[in-house]
Image: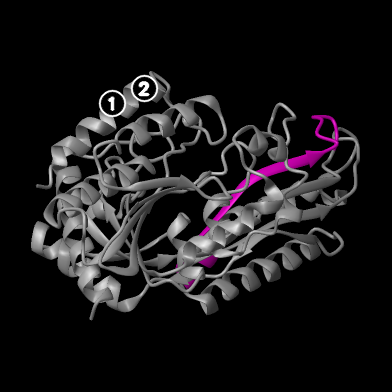
Amino acid sequence: MLNPQRTIAELKELRELTADENGAWRVAWADTWLRAREWFNRKLQDLPVEQHYDAAGNNWVTLKGQSEKALLIGGHLDSVPGGGWLDGCLNVLAGLEVLRRIAAEFEGNPPVTVRLVDWADEEGARFGRSLLGSSAFSGTLQPELEKDRTDKDGVRLEEALQRCGVELDRMLEAQAEQKNAAAYIELHIEQGPVLLDMGLPLGAVLGTFGVERHAITFWGQAAHSGSTPMHRRKDAFLAAAKMAPEVYRIAERNGGVCTIGSCVTKPGIVTSVVEECTITLDQRHLDAAALARLKQEAWEASQRFAQEGGLPEPEWRTIWRIEPILFHPELIELCDQAIREVAGVSHRLPSGPLHDAAEVARAGIPTVMMFVQSLHGISHNKIEDTEEAHLELAVRAFDRLADKVMAWILR
């Protein structure tokens, strides 16, 4: 029998094990994360499952079924430093409860194989490379591009992986886990305020935003801040600063979101006009054409502001990009049905943050996510929270979704 209260109790148990008054500390490849994984593996002892780590460090729990076709249920135990008590781990522990129910109901032999996966390093918090394990699974990871990554203490990613039994050059062998994968489902806290503002507990996720992420450098001329008249200045910061309100206007016209997240000036002293200013721009949209417009309009604005200030053409450097990932329409419908059956009402919404589900979908596996409301609309923060009644609804709806998707696989 499904027991959502057990999931809530286990979430609190994990919080007690891996968090303090400043939040959760399950940073991937670090000792607390490894302890969390050991704790999770002990929860499997009474289940008729096989557990192993793949070449990328993803933790797989397999309940073999009458069909080799497999339903994948995924999440991640790692957190950002000082993160919340639900981000990622709700997915894994709700999936564990669903796995328990299926194993009991079908006496260890469900109609399809069910596989629960704890993805390695979803957050990318230590080395700046999100979705590390799931991108190895999907095959989009390029190990040669990750070799020079280091953390704030100078530890190389490659060294941290080796300490945990993972070889960077072999991570793509995790693609073998795609065999017989017929569908993937994932439950996650929303991390934003949409469901909260609508007063709804649950939502079906349409897909994950595509991302355009760039560094933009404006070039001016250093000059004494006391002796240089205002009309004679070539101020790189002035041009860059105009981008801040402009990206809001661009998002208002096209939808999606735009964020200037950092600003670095040189020479960076109070007595000099800014000679060089670099800002970072993050743009996200679910529609590829609209995402392209966001970038194009921002590029045009940067040219205009540079020209207005008498500056040369600014330099754009791509930091990272990913296309929008749309989830499977039939699975979205099943997710919507499951939510309505449990909560009475549902809402379909996109995901602004990226998730492992995006990489699974990129591998061509039918995928859908379910969101549960986040109090305050806040995540990656120690105040992250969700009402326990909503957590219980989420586990019940997610379990209902698992049944629907198993039937869909066998259709």
> Can residue 283 be spotted in the picture?
yes
User: Against 180, is 3 above or below?
Assistant: above
**Residue type indicated by callout 1:** Glu
Q: Quadrant of residue 41?
A: top left
Q: Quadrant of residue 346?
A: bottom left
Q: Element at badge 1? A: helix
Q: How many angstroms separate mark 2 from mark 1 (CA)?
A: 6 Å
Asked whether disc 2 touches disc 1, contact meaning CB atoms under 8 Å apart, the reply is yes
**Residue type indicated by callout 2:** Leu
Residue 14: percent from left, percent from top:
33, 28
124 or 373, which lies in front? 124
Residue with the most extreme top position? 21
- Total numbered badges shown on the rendered structure: 2
Residue that mark 1 sits on: 13
Residue 18: percent from left, percent from top:
40, 24
User: Against 26, is 348 above or below?
Assistant: below
Q: Residue at x 56, y 57 (%)?
A: 174
Q: Element at badge 2? A: helix
Q: Which residues are magenta?
A: 249-272
Which label sits on residue 308? none
User: Against 150, is 355 above or below?
Assistant: below
Left/right placement of residue 199 relative to residue 308 reads left
Left/right placement of residue 232 relative to residue 80 reads right
Residue 299: percent from left, percent from top:
69, 68
> Can residue 25 be spotted in the picture?
no
